[in-house]
């Protein structure tokens, strides 16, 4: 019997939901909507769709393995060198590459409780030790947010990576510029801080923390971004990291030669210019989030104030019957018991109509 290496043997696999068409068949209902994967309800950026249409005749060719045009556009957007950019098959790919490049069984990596599920998977797959630091409580200033002091205190001689998502998934919690800056300043230079900004575009501009502005000050900082959320390109799989060129150079050594496909490269490049679409995505999200928070307030349901495109709602009881009720009425949400939050559901902010549908169902779902 073939045994996987120890890190992999212990892992619980990521369990994706069933396709909507299969669920509709199973449950005998139509028009199921998914508010479970933090996808953009507006669909893809129209500029991205237009850009890839002519590419169909070129699918016999390999993509540009260096992603030259996309890197050029990103370098301009962020005011960094092209040698500071690493492209990935989703930002997930870059997170895994970072673990592969900088961890071994002798090392550990730090992340917060209730943070993105891929961090412990990526760390353990290498056989490295994962140090999950308890999050702040519901009653703190930042409910279920990162305890940065505890994370700093957990750094030891074997620590090589620290993963922080801001805004965080699945909580939607958010770290301020000052708190994050103070934290990074305390981290020794041989420990890499990975600042995962997958949801950055959804945080209001006035309070947005753009870690890329600190790259020249902190050579051990890596910022990751994605086209999966506000740009609406989750299906194409494209994300990237910004870092010191030395870090990008190391990651590049283990990156698969064609890890980003040609449609993704082209669509992402076009989407960068689609400021209107991003504005619209932000506006739709802000409105839907407000409607859902108001509904939770009325129902006296506790939630984490969110700076993302989702809301973590605490039902103060096992959330599974509520999940089932919503599902049987055509709405898929995301249980988060696997994160240690069995009483909560994470609800993606869909279109206004979708959120209205959910709001109409919630009172009976929680009754
Ligand atoms: N980081 C966070 C915090 C996420 O929630 C996600 C997606 N759920 C990702 C990274 C990865 O997204 P992608 O691979 O689609 O870029």
Image (cartoon, rainbow, N blue to C red):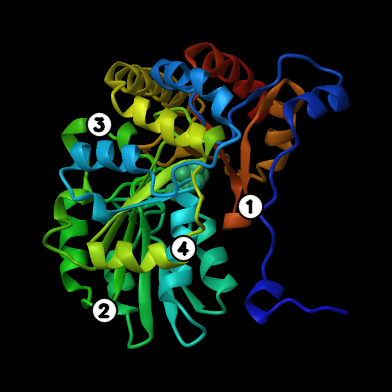
Do the residues under discs 3 and 1 have CB atoms within 8 angstroms?
Answer: no
Q: Nearer the viewer, mark 3 or mark 2?
A: 2
The residue positioned 69% from the left and 35% from the top of the image is 323
What SS does tag 3 mark?
loop
Do the residues under discs 2 and 1 have CB atoms within 8 angstroms?
Answer: no
Expressed as whole percent of the image width and height from the top left, the position of residue 69 reads 32, 37
- In terms of sequence position, does the residue under pointer 2 or pointer 1 come before the other? 2
User: Vertically, is 62 above or below 220?
Assistant: above
Expressed as whole percent of the image width and height from the top left, the position of residue 317 reads 63, 44
Q: In the figure, is residue 128 to the left or right of 138?
A: right
Query: How far apart in space, not on screen, are marks 3 and 1 (Cα)?
Result: 29 Å
- In terms of sequence position, does the residue under pointer 3 or pointer 1 come before the other? 3
- In terms of sequence position, does the residue under pointer 3 or pointer 2 come before the other? 2
The residue positioned 71% from the left and 21% from the top of the image is 330
Expressed as whole percent of the image width and height from the top left, the position of residue 357 reads 59, 15
- In terms of sequence position, does the residue under pointer 4 or pointer 2 come before the other? 4
Q: In the figure, is residue 97 to the left or right of 329?
A: left
Q: Which residue is mark 2?
A: 190
Q: Nearer the viewer, residue 179 or 63?
A: 63
Figure quadrant of the N terminus: bottom right
């Amino acid at each position: 019997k073939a045994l996987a290496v120890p890190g992999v043997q212990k892992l619980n696999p990521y369990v994706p939901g069933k396709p909507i068409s299969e669920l509709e068949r199973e449950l005998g209902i139509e028009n199921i909507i998914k508010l479970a994967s933090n996808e953009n309800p507006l669909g893809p950026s129209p500029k991205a769709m237009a850009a890839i249409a002519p590419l169909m005749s070129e699918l016999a060719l390999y993509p540009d393995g260096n992603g030259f045009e996309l890197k050029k556009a990103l370098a301009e957007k962020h005011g960094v060198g092209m040698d500071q950019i690493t492209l990935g098959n989703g930002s997930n790919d870059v997170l895994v590459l970072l673990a592969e490049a900088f961890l071994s069984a002798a090392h550990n990596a730090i992340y917060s409780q209730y943070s993105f599920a891929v961090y412990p998977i990526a760390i353990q797959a290498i056989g490295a030790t994962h140090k999950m630091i308890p999050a702040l409580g519901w009653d703190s200033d930042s409910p279920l947010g990162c305890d940065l002091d505890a994370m700093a205190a957990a750094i030891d001689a074997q620590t090589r990576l620290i993963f922080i998502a801001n805004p965080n998934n699945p909580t939607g919690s958010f770290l301020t510029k000052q708190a994050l800056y103070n934290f990074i300043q305390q981290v020794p230079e041989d420990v890499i801080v990975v600042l995962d900004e997958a949801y950055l575009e959804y945080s209001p501009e006035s309070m947005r923390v753009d870690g890329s502005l600190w790259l020249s000050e902190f050579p051990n900082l890596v910022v990751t971004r994605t086209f999966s959320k506000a740009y609406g390109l989750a299906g194409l799989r494209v994300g990237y990291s910004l870092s010191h060129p030395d870090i990008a150079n190391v990651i590049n050594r283990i990156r698969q030669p064609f890890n980003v496909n040609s449609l993704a490269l082209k669509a992402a490049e076009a989407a960068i210019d689609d400021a209107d679409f991003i504005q619209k995505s932000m506006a739709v999200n802000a409105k839907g989030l407000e409607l859902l928070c108001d509904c939770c307030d009325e129902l006296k349901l506790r939630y984490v104030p969110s700076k993302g495109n989702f809301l973590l709602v605490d039902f103060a009881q096992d959330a599974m019957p509520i999940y089932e009720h919503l599902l049987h009425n055509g709405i898929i949400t995301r249980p988060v018991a696997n994160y240690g939050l069995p009483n909560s559901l994470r609800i993606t902010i869909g279109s206004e109509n979708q959120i209205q549908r959910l709001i109409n169902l919630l009172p009976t779902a929680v009754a």
